[in-house]
Image (cartoon, helix red, strand yellow):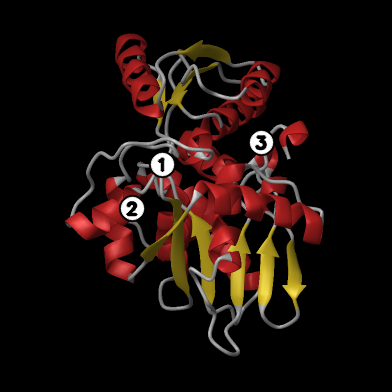
Amino acid sequence: MITRDDAVAAAARVAGYIRRTPVVEAEPGALWLKLEFLQHSGSFKARGMFNRILAGDVPAAGVIAASGGNAGGAVAYAAQTLGLPAEVFVPVTTPPVKIEALHRRGATVVQHGNEYAEAYEAATKRAADNGALFCHAYDQIDVCAGQGTLGLELLEQVPDVDTVLIAVGGGGLMAGVAAALEGSARVVAVEPETCPTLHSALAAGAPADVEVSGVAADSLGARRVGTIAYEVAVRTGVHSLLVSDDDIVAARRALWDRYRVLVEHGTAAAYAALLTRAYTPATGERVALVLCGANTDPTRL
């Protein structure tokens, strides 16, 4: 089980390898934007991947990951920084902008299957065959603990934050942040209606496969929420809100129009919960919105 102590240990381990991303007060005294898309590799994933790699011994074969794009980009960046070989398996549906970034960071890219789950199966088989260190996109303690460093950082920047809204796919970011903030602030998960992994798990009482599709599937398209994420959500009282693809597209556009912030669709899901009033803050509630990734094609705004 992941705790705040795991995030604290991860923060010490990854210090010097990750950026302390800024927070912008978007609505005075009410709403803060955590600009995590400014993190190395364009998403929060670098935190977890650095922690995963630095926490253990890496064999000569290097590291392997399966990804919709962002986790792979983070693995590639971390491996390049640390002088290690990296191989990344992605679905054939992965946006070209993410494939290009993987190549720029020196990773060997294998496109396999139409969904993350199919790329994951191929990647785990490859790791078993060559002995490389497998870096899970969201369901390893070291990965979740690394993501939790964002929560610790946010609490330093907005000490009296009440609520943190986070987009959820596999749930690694939510798990790490909820564990890091346990007893200090609540976390609310936001998911596309077309990728309701946590929402379905909480309703069913256990993680289970769901059908995934839609505009945010490239980053939030895990077929099943992670076991770690589910356990943390239950323990800390995280609940999940659903938003539509149209809501996500509108939120992504609104972030650009209002704040000149360009993010990927999955990231915009969290803001969609505020725009649609799926989440309505109470009077005086201090809300932070995690803008977790911006690996997107700006021409598709």
Name the foreground residue: 265 vs 247. 247
Residue 218 appears at what percent x and percent y?
51, 33
Residue shown at 66%/36% (left/top)?
295
Residue flagged by tag 2: what amino acid is it?
Leu
How far apart in space, not on screen, are marks 2 and 3 (Cα)? 23 Å
The residue carrying mark 1 is 138
Q: Amino acid at mark 1?
A: Tyr
Q: Residue at x 66, y 28 (%)?
A: 81
Q: CA distance from mark 2 to mark 1?
A: 13 Å
Residue 108 image point, x, y percent? 56, 12
Say which quadrant the N terminus sits in. bottom left
* 178 with respect to 31 (left or right): left
**Whether residue 214 is situated above or below residue 258 in the rendered picture:** above
Residue 194 location, x and y as percent?
Answer: 41, 43
Residue 295: mark: 3
Q: Is residue 96 above or below residue 198?
A: above
- Residue placed under numbered mark 2 in the picture: 198
Q: In terms of depth relative to the viewer, which is nearer, 141 or 250?
A: 250
**How many labels sit on residues?**
3
